[in-house]
Amino acid sequence: MIKEYAGPILDEIGEALKDMDYDVLWKMVAEIHGANRIFFHAIGRPELPMKNFAMYLKHFGYRVHVVGDVTCPAIKPGDVFFAVSGTGETNTTLNMVKKCKEIGEIKVLLMTAAEKSTIGDLADLVLRVDCPLPGVPSTVSSIQPVGGLFDECVVYALDWALRACLQERLGRRDGAGPMHSNLE
């Protein structure tokens, strides 16, 4: 059964990511690289790959925080808020983005499947992946359960594309970095 699904699912991922805007990726790299600190937020399944990406940045020496963790400090001007919201309408995320705008001088980066959204309208940079979600039009169809393709695209867009761009910017080829855990 896995053989019947593996190929089509990989094809879906490729189709969803083929038009990803690499100019936006490089702009996100610049914002992340120039930020005092980077705060990450997602709800549900996209939270896991987002945390994975945040950990890579930590390993590379960036000051990162995941919103909701007990050690997360207050966000301040000069920081970056990086959110993942498939629809771009997640209420909790929207409220956080509004708070960032209220504080001022905080760059908001968004990864979403929505071409147009409330959070996207407030964000400074929007990385869109073409995935079907309820209420979100897409040119890509999926054989997977609702949201599955978006979840996978979060993994590939953050872990492969954005992390690769950051590694190139830092001149690093390995995935570890100077801050990788040494208590393992």
Image: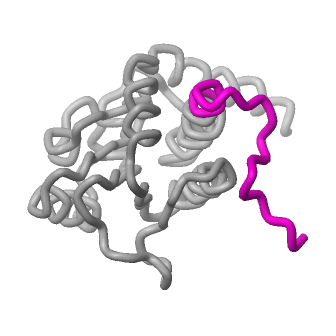
Instruction: Classify 68 as above or below 168.
Output: below
Queried whether the magenta region covers residue 165, the answer comes back as yes
Which color scheme does this rendered protein use? Answer: one colour
Residue displayed at 41% across by 32% down: 30
Q: Quadrant of the C terminus?
A: bottom right
Residue displayed at 62% across by 52% down: 61
Position of residue 57 measured from the top left corner of the image (x, y, whole percent): 60, 50
Q: What are the residue bounds of the magenta stretch?
A: 164-184
Queried whether the magenta region covers residue 182, the answer comes back as yes
> Which secondary structure type mostly characterizes the magenta part of the structure?
loop
The quarter of the picture where residue 158 lies is top right
The number of numbered badges drawn on the structure is: 0
Position of residue 38 measured from the top left corner of the image (x, y, whole percent): 43, 55
The quarter of the picture where residue 134 lies is top left
Residue displayed at 85% across by 39% down: 1
Residue sitting nearer the eye, 38 or 4: 38
Residue sitting nearer the eye, 170 or 83: 170
Position of residue 43 measured from the top left corner of the image (x, y, whole percent): 43, 64
Instruction: Classify 139 as above or below 40.
Output: above
